Amino acid sequence: MQKVCVVEDENSIAEMIRMNLELEGFEVMHFDHGMMASEHFSQLPEYDLIILDVMLPGVNGVELCRQIRENSQVPVLFLSAKGTTSDRIEGLKAGGNDYLPKPFDLEELLLRVGVLTNINKKETAEVVQIGKCEVNFKTFLITNSDSGEVINLSKKEVSLIQLFHEKEGEVIARSEILDRVWGKDQFPTTRTIDNYILNFRKVFEDDPKHPKHFHSIRGVGYKFTK
Ligand code: CA
């Protein structure tokens, strides 16, 4: 199920959005205060779309968007009564993907939500190059182009590499990795993830002590770069 976060201090608007997005099959989270939303985003929650009102108590929507962009490329849609060109430009400069002035037409909102949530669904590549290694997600094999060595991956390892690839350049929290790769029914410790990463480094990194691909982000999780 795709998840949308709505930050809007006018509860009637927020409820209207929530109801309609839930009817469209989205799971919806709502905050009515900028500060609470800011705290929530600092935990790096996973969303398919974030809808931000601009004028909010505590922290405004543009600031929230800047904060989100430090760690994530999740699509952001601004909603605002401030619909002048300069406001739109400010929102887009802060990293917003779209801007809908209030009052808005519900159908238009839903259409834009549809477009924005689809851009996030990247085609999953079959083969990915990481350093000297080629990873094949269909055959579960890694081939080292230097040594010619071929390594078999487990299903978990493939899922983990796919997640890193999908989120390339973004910080991924350990909790998100557990949620996405292990699911809610299994309870591995965060140490399990660390062990997987140690193994990946042995395979992919020229110098596992100074990784170029699988970076540790202290206190949070990991970041992958190709
Ligand atoms: Ca407002």
Image (tube, helix red, strand yellow):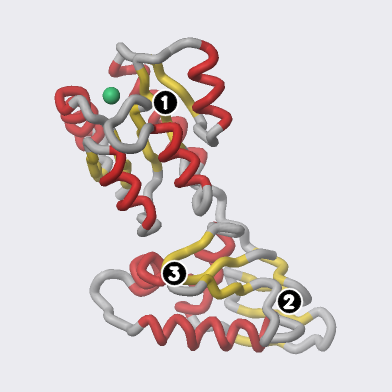
Reply above or below: 86 against 72.
Answer: above
Q: Amino acid at mark 2?
A: Cys
Residue 133, which numbered label?
2
Reply above or below: 202 against 51.
Answer: below
Marks 1 and 2, how far apart at CA = 39 Å
Q: Are marks 1 and 2 in contact (CB under 8 Å)?
A: no
143 on left or right of 112: right
Q: In the image, is the residue at mark 3 within 8 Å of ligand 1 by its beta carbon?
A: no
On the image, the x and y values in percent for residue 131 come to 75, 73
**Foreground disc of the pair 3, 1:** 3
Q: Are marks 3 and 2 in contact (CB under 8 Å)?
A: no
Q: Earlier in the sequence, mark 3 or mark 2?
A: 2
Marks 3 and 2, how far apart at CA = 27 Å
At a point 16% along the width and 28% down the height, the residue shown is 11
Q: Which residue is mark 3?
A: 220
Quarter of the rendering containing residue 142: bottom right
Q: Nearer the viewer, residue 31 or 159?
A: 31
Q: In the image, is the residue at mark 1 within 8 Å of ligand 1 by its beta carbon?
A: no
Ligand 1 location (quadrant): top left
Q: Which residue is mark 1?
A: 112
Badge 1 marks a residue whose secondary structure is helix
Marks 3 and 1, how far apart at CA = 32 Å
On the image, the x and y values in percent for residue 137 come to 58, 69
Q: Nearer the viewer, residue 136 or 216?
A: 216
Badge 3 marks a residue whose secondary structure is loop
**Foreground disc of the pair 3, 2:** 3
Q: Amino acid at mark 1?
A: Arg
At a point 33% along the width and 25% down the height, the residue shown is 55
At a point 50% along the width and 50% down the height, the residue shown is 72
**Quick one: label 2, few (<14), some, or many (20+) residues within 10 Å?**
many
On the image, the x and y values in percent for residue 101 come to 39, 15
Q: Earlier in the sequence, mark 1 or mark 2?
A: 1
